[in-house]
Image: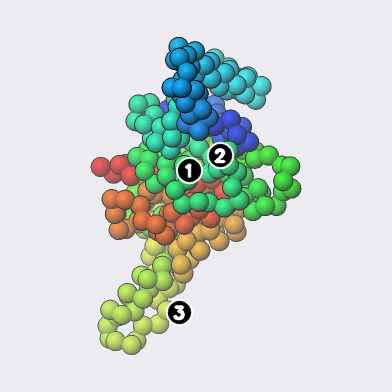
Amino acid sequence: MTRFNHIMACIDLSDYSPMTLGYALGLAGRADLKVTICSIVPLREVNPVYMAGMMYPCREDTKEYLEELKEARITQIKELIRTRHPEFDGKTDIRIKMGYPAEEILTMIEEVDPDLVVMANKGRSNLSSFMFGSAAEFVFRHCRKALFSVRDKHIFKRMYSGNELPAPGELRNIMAAVDFSPWTEHILARAGWIAKITGAKLHVVHCIGTKELAWIKSHYIPENTFSEEEFLPKAKQQRKNRLEDHIKAAGIEDLAGIDITIDSGDPCEQILSAAKNLRADALVLGPLGHSRSVKFVLGSTIEKIFRHSPVPVLRLSPDICI
């Protein structure tokens, strides 16, 4: 069963940081993972200091101020860990950089080389909806490591009042969405590993897409004899059998009570609907689908799920099958 060994949490000391740390250190504590905490000081916070240093002969003072800024952030992070996760006090590697958050996070991921990156879907701006090009979405698209995008489903749906703060949820139901792409067994293995260390129930979900059904109908022989009502029950049973074989190949057949759900329709809608019906606490996806395009495509199923899923989304590394 494939596992993670090194986890990197990206925090900005916003309201979402305790939630991000909660998920990251919660997994680390259950599986004895190495933990690195990354925090980026945005340029907008230090540009005035740079400007002052250029206009006045105080460059040494400017450098000293920036170092103090980094030390202050390290102190805040240590205090956050000490008060909320005392068992990790002094046991994490904390790294601070300055620059554009998305770019610096990707650079730090290359330097640290973690197995799993954990970050919130929002940051200091706390926007009510995603903005294309935001740091979270940029990192989601370009990160070459497994990325766990965490979010509070009640705040995501605006079910809480504006005074509520994001909080990590308990992982009781893990949902793995598979499409028989080359990543299927890896998705199952990692979802199964998380389910095992957290004691969660594993739900495996597959959707027979509308495009696939349309293609089958157009190539059906003899022509105009395709019956969706007759085809779907047989197809669902065949795919359930295939999924059972993949579960064995992934080495997770010993997990108790693995649930398999197969639906048909628009994949994004069906996956999000299944997450709601199954009361999923986290959703595990592959990096790409059957197309295996080199870059993420705006509007793809995985990206739509990232934007609209009210529960945390774990997207695996695009390089996992290389």
Q: Are marks 1 and 2 in contact (CB under 8 Å)?
A: yes
Look at 35% across and 52% down and name the residue there.
Answer: 296
Cα distance in 3D space between marks 2 and 3? 47 Å
Spot the residue most to the left: 322
Give above or below for 155 relative to 83: below
Q: In the displayed structure, would residue 195 be above or below residue 48?
A: below
Q: Residue at x 47, y 57 (%)?
A: 304
Q: Identify the residue at image location x=42%, y=28%.
A: 6
Q: Which mark is residue 123?
A: 2
- What number is the disc on residue 229? 3
> Residue 114's spot in the image, x, y percent?
39, 30
Is 302 left or right of 29, judged from the image as shown? Answer: left
Q: Looking at the picture, tell me which residue is in the foreground, 185 or 130.
A: 130
x%, y% of residue 106? Answer: 38, 35
- Of residue 228 and residue 211, the one placed in the foreground of this image is 211
Q: Does residue 41 appear in this view? A: no
The three-letter code of the residue at mark 3 reads Glu
Residue type marked 2: Gly
Screen quadrant of the N terminus: top left
Q: Are discs 2 and 3 less than 8 Å apart at CB?
A: no
Q: Is residue 149 visible?
A: yes
Q: Helix, strand, or loop for circle 1? A: helix
Mark 1 residue type: Ala
Give the Cα separation between the discs numbered 3 and 1.
42 Å
Give the number of the disc on residue 212.
none
**Image depth: mark 3 or mark 1 in front:** 1
State the residue position of label 1.
Answer: 136
Closer to the camera in the image, 219 or 248: 219
Label 2's element? loop
